[in-house]
Image (cartoon, rainbow, N blue to C red):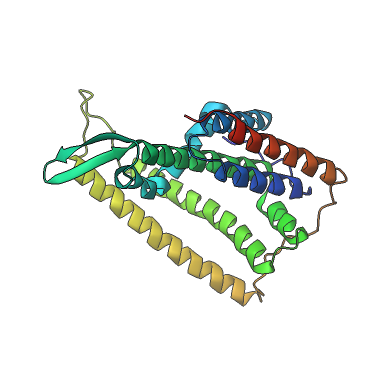
């Protein structure tokens, strides 16, 4: 379990700025900067340890970024420089580019690290404190409110998925048979069942969103997320921001000076 938020009622601007600056610095690293990316992940692992999140658990949670970097895979076969292999696979003629593989792998690691940084922000700061920080940073109200509602609704969606999985488990005798053999049909059957669960989750989430909108409208909602009392401003915000940008500068220099693979 992720540690309980520690910044409830506190100024979270330093945490928000640190996350944004860190993710931006990671995104700007050139392809092949694996040593600099390793340094960036070690920083995240250290921050996670301070929050009570082990590096293994943090790395495992970051794997949710994998499906979103599938779009970078075709570049491995589309580039023609630094060819590693070229040949025919059935009716197709394929080639594997070393440069494309480097770009795709770097994009995968960047997405993986960025997701972990966002998770650490959510573990450190509550949704209201993040919204408050965005407002104090003079971001448009639409952006601040949308960010807060997205965080809250993702939590509702997660709870809804847990209830569906709990209901499925309650209606199933066992995931394995008496002789330890797997039961439950073929792979296609399992894929179809999983698709039905995802579709049902989408419909239930959409229905809940409608109910939330109707409830908010009936209570006179104006489109601004209520955050209650504004927390006290952090007196050490300037020092923290300077420290954050020093770390980001070090990460950028590592990406420029360290050898690329």
Residue at 80% across, 58% down: 229
Q: Going by the picture, which residue comes out furthest to the left?
A: 91
Q: Where residue 255 appears, x then y in whole percent?
A: 59, 35
Residue 20 vertical position relative to residue 63 in the rendered view, above or below: below
Q: State the residue in front, 70 or 204.
A: 70
Please indicate, yes or no, whether residue 64 appears anywhere in the rendered image: no
Q: Going by the picture, which residue comes out furthest to the right?
A: 235
Residue 192 vertical position relative to residue 252 in the rendered view, above or below: below
Q: How many labels does the image show?
A: 0
Which picture quadrant has residue 226?
Answer: bottom right
Q: Going by the picture, which residue comes out furthest to the front?
A: 81
If the image is split into quadrants, where does the N terminus sit?
top right
Q: Where residue 243 appears, x then y in whole percent?
A: 77, 38
Please indicate, yes or no, whether residue 259 appears anywhere in the rendered image: yes
Q: Where residue 78 appears, x then y in whole percent?
A: 31, 47
Q: Where residue 261 appears, x then y in whole percent?
A: 47, 29
Q: State the residue in front, 252 or 164.
A: 252
Q: Is residue 217 left or right of residue 66?
A: right
Q: Is residue 72 left or right of residue 141?
A: left
Q: State the residue in front, 41 or 6.
A: 41
Residue at 50% across, 65% down: 209
Residue at 78% across, 49% down: 11
Q: State the residue in front, 65 or 157.
A: 65
Residue 37 vertical position relative to residue 64 in the rendered view, above or below: above
């Amino acid at each position: 379990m992720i540690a309980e938020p520690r910044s409830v009622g506190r100024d979270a601007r330093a945490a928000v700025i640190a996350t944004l600056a860190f993710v931006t610095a990671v995104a700007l690293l050139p392809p092949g900067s694996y040593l600099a990316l390793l340094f960036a992940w070690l920083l995240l692992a250290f921050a996670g340890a301070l929050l009570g999140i082990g590096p293994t658990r943090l790395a495992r949670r970051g794997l949710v970024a994998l499906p979103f970097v599938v779009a970078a895979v075709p570049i491995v076969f589309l580039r023609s420089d630094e060819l590693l292999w070229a040949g025919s696979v059935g009716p197709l003629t394929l080639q594997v580019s070393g440069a494309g593989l480097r770009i795709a792998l770097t994009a995968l690691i960047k997405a993986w690290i960025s997701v972990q940084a966002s998770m650490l922000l959510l573990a450190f700061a509550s949704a209201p404190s993040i919204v408050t920080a965005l407002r104090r940073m003079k971001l448009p109200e639409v952006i601040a409110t949308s960010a807060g509602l997205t965080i809250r609704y993702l939590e509702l969606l997660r709870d809804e998925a847990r209830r569906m999985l709990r209901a499925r488990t309650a209606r199933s005798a066992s995931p394995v048979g008496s002789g330890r053999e797997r039961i439950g049909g073929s792979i296609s059957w399992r894929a179809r069942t999983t698709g039905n669960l995802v579709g049902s989750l989408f419909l239930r989430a959409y229905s809940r969103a409608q109910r939330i909108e109707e409830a908010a409208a009936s209570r006179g909602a104006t489109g601004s997320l209520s955050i209650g009392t504004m927390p006290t401003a952090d007196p050490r915000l300037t020092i923290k921001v300077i420290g954050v940008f020093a770390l980001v500068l070090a990460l950028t220099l590592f990406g420029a000076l360290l050898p690329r693979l």
